[in-house]
Amino acid sequence: MNSTTNNADVVLSVRDLCVETVSKSDPKPILKSVSFDVYASETLCIVGESGSGKSVTAFAIMGLLPPDALRITGGTISLNNKNLADSSYGEILALRATTMSMVFQEPMTALNPVQRVGEQIDEVIRIHRNMPAAQRKQMVLKMLGEVDLPDPPRIYESYPHELSGGQRQRIVIAIALILEPKLLIADEPTTALDVTTQKQILYLMKQLQKLHGTSVIFITHDFGVVAEIADRILVMRNGVKVEEGTRTQILRAPVDAYTKELISSVPSIHPPEAKHAKREPVLAVRNLSKTYGRKPLFGKARGVAALSDINLDVHKDEVVGIVGESGSGKSTLARCVIGLAAGWEGDILLGSRPLEPHSRDRPQDIKKRIQIVFQDPYRSLNPRRRIAASLMEGLVNFGMPAKQALEKVADVLSIVGLDASVLDRYPHQFSGGQRQRLCLARAIVMEPEILIADEAVSALDVTVQGQVLELLADIKRRTQVAILFITHDLRVAAQISDKIIVMQKGRIVEQGTPQEVISAPREAYTKELINSAPGSNWDFKHFREFVPSPA
């Protein structure tokens, strides 16, 4: 964007926007006098942690605030010479898709699962344009081509579940841009995607922005993504604008301490110095293969190879990072080790003891020695049970008296940075980071020899993510537990792993120390993962770009 902007270039102007909860007795402020402008054909990134007010700002602009929960109490939102804050629902509805559109984080929930995607895009045109069906279909097929989807006629007839996550997000983008709105709001549209798919979506949005001249508000908590696409950056915290400036100003010379913390929390693709220590093996996987079968109504059964000839070792006091895209076999490997995916071939040994494929066939002492932490801590904890009951459950099930189990849980909480006062509370009373700490406490209270962390930090803000990574490293130092760390983010793996294993389509394609894999990758796929990591050319901790080495 040209830095010499004037009022004529302003597409959206937000002034002193205030939003509060709907309550006669105790209304609480959510947004406090937030002001900013969005200029023609620029990308403004709004950055902040969960609860900062990013999404509430977007919903206020789009007229999507839940009327029984939140309301605008002051300020103006000027779009197309109309104050959206004072507009009726019908007036705002007429502007959606035609003048402003929104792309949400999870495309599967944004799409109708029982309607073909072509019909869903067509619906937008049909509502807002008086146009023959054949002309609408040609318009949709053209848009499917613009968002780089293969074979547009086939995609047109497909249902959402028949497409990949990246393809579904392209469909949502097509719906948002089909009528060429002046303003596009993208709310964390790449958070749930693999780094390679994320890179493709970010590139696609920039290309479509140039093609259609759209202004973009891109909401994210990841400064790595911001470094790739932002023209200007607005930082929010607790409903207040903290700092605003160009991408270069914010990334190279942030003023506010909170902005500095957010930026420096982004994990670097460049690993720290290697640690050399020989440890005894805890887990050994030999020639492991797993095929998921599909039996059609007629004909022969078909199989999909999820794992093929996997060999790896995990040693005591070691973090082994398993990296790859969705469908690479990472989580299937974890499920085989923990005993949640039976029917595999090969051998999995804990120490020298071979493991049965199914958890129910394993001895009780074996079950205790392998624990897992999943991606979503809220779904991992029973919302109807107090934290004490959830954390004690494993110990009690293995025969420990309740009083002794409660004492042990209270002791373990100190390891994860919490105290015994949390035991009487429910999961919804904690932040996402605190809930993940509780899930870690529930796992390590069993004193496992191996801990599996399956995308355990993927859903967290970068600052909380950094805290949980430090916590995992601290747990490893204190307990000597071996950790199998599964992630699609090579930046995260680089910072915590002693060894990195790269998987693609059920196979190990490369493995070694972080320095070997990242500094001198041998495989083209590994190089693609490294190059796709958002912000890979930035040293966020020192607020500078990496200087390319001379040829």
Image (cartoon, rainbow, N blue to C red):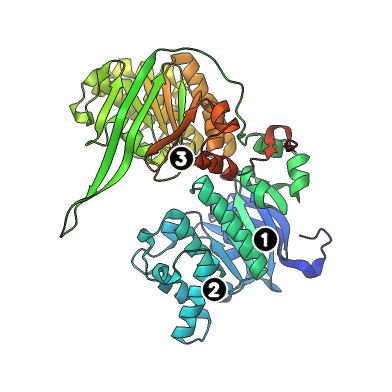
- Residue 249, image x, y percentages: 78, 45
Q: Which mark is residue 282?
A: none
Q: Which of the two marks, 3 or 1, is nearer to us in this view?
A: 3
- Residue 462, image x, y percentages: 58, 38
Per the image, label 3 sits on a secondary structure element best described as loop
Q: In this picture, is 509 found above or below 470?
A: below
Residue 299: name its quadrant: bottom left
Q: Which mark is residue 324?
A: 3
Q: Which of the two marks, 2 or 3, is nearer to us in this view?
A: 3
Which of the marked residues, 1 or 2, is nearer the chain's N terminus?
A: 1
Residue 504: name its quadrant: top left
Q: Are marks 3 and 1 in contact (CB under 8 Å)?
A: no
Q: Is residue 39 left or right of residue 332?
A: right
Q: Residues within 10 Å of mark 1 (few under 14, many from 20)?
A: some
Q: Name the residue at 55% across, 63% down.
A: 102
Q: In this picture, is 365 found above or below 189?
A: above
Residue that badge 2 annotates: 93
Q: Residue furthest front?
A: 551
Which of the marked residues, 3 or 1, is nearer the chain's N terminus?
A: 1
Q: Which of the two marks, 1 or 2, is nearer to us in this view?
A: 2
- Quadrant (top left, top right, bottom left, bottom right) of the N terminus: bottom right
Q: What's the residue type where badge 3 is placed? A: Gly
